[in-house]
Amino acid sequence: MNEFAVQLTGVGKDYRFFSLNDVRLEVPVGQIMGFIGPNGAGKSTTIRILMGLVHQDRGEVRVLGHSMPKEQAAAKRDIGFASEDMRLYGSSTLDWHMRFVRSVYPSWDESYAQTLLKRFDLRREQRITGMSHGQQVKAGLLLALARRPRLLILDEPTTGLDPVARHEVIRELTAVMQDDHRSILFSSHNTHDIEQISDQITFIDRGRIIDCRDKESFLDRWRRIRVELPGDVDVPALPGIIGVLQTGRLAVATTNAFDVSLPRAYEAAGIRVHAVENMTLEEIFVTNVHYSREGVAV
Amino acid sequence: MNRALVMRLIVKDWYLSRVPLALVALAGAVSTGLLYSGETAGLAGLISALIALVFLSILIPQLTVVNERKQGNLAFVMSLPISPAEYTMSKVLGNLSAFVLLWAAIVGAVLGTIASVPGAGGVIPLGVIAALAPFVSFCLLLAVAIVTESELLSMVTMGITNVAYSFWWFLFRLPGFAEGLKSPVPIWSDTILTIIGGQIAVIVLALALTFYLQSRKTDFV
């Protein structure tokens, strides 16, 4: 059995005003990969390539062991897909959609669909046009989840949802992962959602993967060190410090390779360390994007 | 080729278009009824049958291809275990079958009514050409809609094919076209057969190009 649900190697796609370059992405089986990037970073293009909806110009894409886009029909039998811009047929009811999807997927789990109807507070006889945006998103997720896919690919599924609906969706995705053989690729620019459920995190910006590692590594390695300099001098360059913001004698050093030796090195240089602060995933993401755009190796 | 899934997608398109298609069928039935009654009502029936066919040629590609893209349903369809070739097959066969079914019923009823009138057989070749014109428009629009997925280009195609109907009277200047109109039996002159052959060639070419261009397409949503 393949240890990766998703494998992209050297993938690129060129448009007139945007290029996806040398994308390498691996989602291990049984893991949730959070895929974070600003608007226009290339998240949706990458996901469309994964689904075979867009064909890469270069590189290799394998999804559940299938080569994409050539074997997309076989791969999509085991993929549940939902995206922010995917709409169900407005004039039809949720029940019609459920029957339609059930007719396509032998793996459809009707009792689980019933459970999801209750959890998401949806009515199967309701027309899609009569549903709120949140209900439509949840209906799309119900159709993706109840077929019991081995891989869920979700492109900004929580965008535009209220906090309650977002919580319901996140809770359900977490429940899905109780099965070790399922995997999720979850794209969003909402780092809070990603931080809650992901095992692995990938940052993408301007068509390039700028960082990729497990969530705990991100949170452990990134720190902000607040220091006070003894006089009108610059903060000394230390290995692992990727940027310093200095205002007079006060400075904030950011590191993506934190080690207890770093504050000690400052203190040894006569610099007073006021605080060593953890960073949220959002702060790590923003800082990462900022420095990568400035050409700093992060 | 996953024939079962292609068939499900075809049935889905028929189901989602069932109300407008039923209205076209009703319009065709009313037109034939008017035509059968003859005189002025008969002429109105002939014109309304042609309008129903023109409307049908626009309606199906608009509902099942252009609107699916415009309303964001295409991502849902393409997320199903289907290849681009199967998607194209489902759209072409689904559209073609729905169109041909209603087109054949309306055209058959109209031409059958004309043929039942003693001495009116000479009009039938013109009727065949007139009936094939919306068929040509339908295939061109279907090809443009599937290949470009563009509402604008589909509307431009609709506009061009609709304007083309206005130039019909030029055909009457062609030698061998109008001479047989008053004949009691159909006269299939070389001119008539060449025009029909040209129409069929455009239909075949449009459908073949749809499959060819779709096979080279790399972006589907």
Image (cartoon, coloured by chain):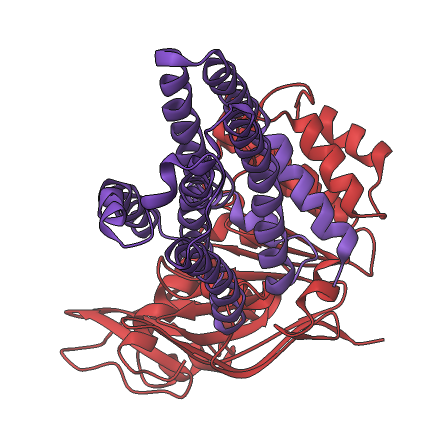
Chain colours: A red, B purple
In the picture shown, does residue B113 fall above or below A85? above
Q: Is residue B111 left or right of residue A139?
A: left
Q: Position of residue B143 (x, y in %)?
A: 45, 56
Q: Position of residue B135 (x, y in %)?
A: 46, 46
Q: Position of residue A170 (x, y in %)?
A: 62, 42
What residue appears at the point 51 percent right and 71 percent down from the top-left corner?
B212
What quarter of the picture does the N terminus of chain B occupy?
A: bottom right
Q: Nearer the viewer, residue A188 or A53?
A: A53
What residue appears at the point 36 percent right and 52 percent down from the top-left corner?
B150
Q: Position of residue A218 (x, y in %)?
A: 53, 68
In the picture shown, does residue A114 fall above or below B69? above
What residue appears at the point 56 percent right and 45 percent down from the top-left corner?
B95
Q: Is residue A159 left or right of residue B172?
A: right
> In this orientation, does residue A279 appear?
no
What residue appears at the point 37 percent right and 38 percent down from the top-left corner?
B181
Q: How many numbered circles does the render carry?
A: 0
Q: Nearer the viewer, residue A143 or A134?
A: A143
- Quarter of the image holding residue A69? bottom right
Q: Nearer the viewer, residue B171 or A78?
A: B171
> In this orientation, does residue B41 appear?
yes
In the picture shown, does residue A102 fall above or below A55? above
Q: Nearer the viewer, residue A150 or A232?
A: A150
- Quarter of the image holding residue B97? top right
In the picture shown, does residue A7 fall above or below B33? below
